[in-house]
Image (cartoon, rainbow, N blue to C red):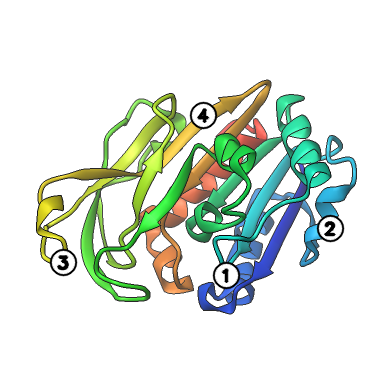
Amino acid sequence: MTKVLYLYGGWPGHHPYDIAAWARELFSELNYQVEESQDIFTLDRDLTGYDLIVLGWNNALTTEDLSDSQEKNLLDAVAAGTGVAAWHGAAAAFRASLKYHFLLGGDFVEHPAGEAFPQPYKVSITDREHEVTAGVEDFAVASEQYYMHVDPNNRVLAETEFSGEHLPWLEGLRSPVAWVRQWGAGRVFYHSIGHTPADLSEPNVRRLTKQGLRYAARVAN
């Protein structure tokens, strides 16, 4: 059975406990054996026994960090083959930990329409050959539209285009929404959707996430 560590909590503005209820449904459907933790110090122990680490942690300040041991344990486990899957606020977590964001493959920079504003936007699947996007169609969202700084070595699966309504110089520019990447022997999956549980309940988002979890855990779809 696939063994998972689900770390969640932190800033309440990202509804981590409501989203945990949504995540539990996916874990149950996938028949994963899940250990939940709301304690960041969980990362201070050996993590190599997990097949997958799901990061639902949310921070509020750019000064928040991982300790040296937490960074090392996380990066070492992934390099040895443990997968990582994460969404939305994980790209704004531990902003002072450069190694964490190197692992994840990107940083949240801004939501041009403003925090928690339900900005309507479209997500376009750009890589239909990958197993994570199998059967996933382009879809509409009304939520925070993340502008991301990302690693050029990510394999981008989906992206969004900015209208320029709020920052005119962004008109027509595109930003990744979902990607996968490799870290040593480990697989990493991330998407930027999920400010509220309703965002994640959209059928295409749900399918993308579920297939991303399988991919990162090396479980065949």
Using the numbered discs, state the Cα–Cα distance from disc 3 to disc 1 in whole angstroms. Answer: 28 Å
Residue at point 61%, 30% (across, down): 187
Q: Residue at x 66, y 21 (%)?
A: 184
Spatial distance from mark 3 to mark 4, Cα to Cα?
A: 31 Å
Q: Are marks 3 and 4 in contact (CB under 8 Å)?
A: no
Disc 1 to disc 4, how far (Cα)? 24 Å
* Residue occupying the point 15% across, 61% down: 167
Would you say the residues marked 2 and 4 are in contact, meaning their CB atoms lie under 8 Å apart? no
* 172 and 95: which is toward the camera: 95
Quarter of the figure with the N terminus: top right
Q: Is residue 125 above or below residue 109?
A: above
Q: Which residue in the protein does label 1 denote?
A: 19
Residue 122 appears in which quarter of the rendering?
bottom left
Q: Nearer the viewer, residue 78 or 220?
A: 78
Is the residue under label 1 in contact with that under label 2 (CB below 8 Å)?
no
Q: Position of residue 186 (x, y in %)?
A: 66, 28
Q: Residues within 10 Å of mark 3 (few under 14, many from 20)?
A: few
Earlier sequence position, callout 2 versus callout 4: 2
Q: Are marks 3 and 2 in contact (CB under 8 Å)?
A: no
Instruction: State if disc 4 and disc 1 touch (CB < 8 Å).
Output: no
Q: Residue furthest top?
A: 184
**Label 1 element class:** helix
Label number found at residue 41: 2
Instruction: Work out how far the residue at label 2 is from the one at label 1, CA to CA, in angstroms.
Output: 21 Å
**Which of the marked residues, 3 or 2, is nearer the chain's N terminus?**
2
Residue that numbered label 4 is attached to: 181
Residue 34 is drawn in which quadrant? Answer: bottom right
Position of residue 48 in the picture relative to residue 10 (left or right): right
Q: Secondary structure at mark 4?
A: strand
Counting residues from the start of the chain, the first of labels 1 and 4 encountered is 1
- Tell which of 203 and 209 is nearer to you: 209
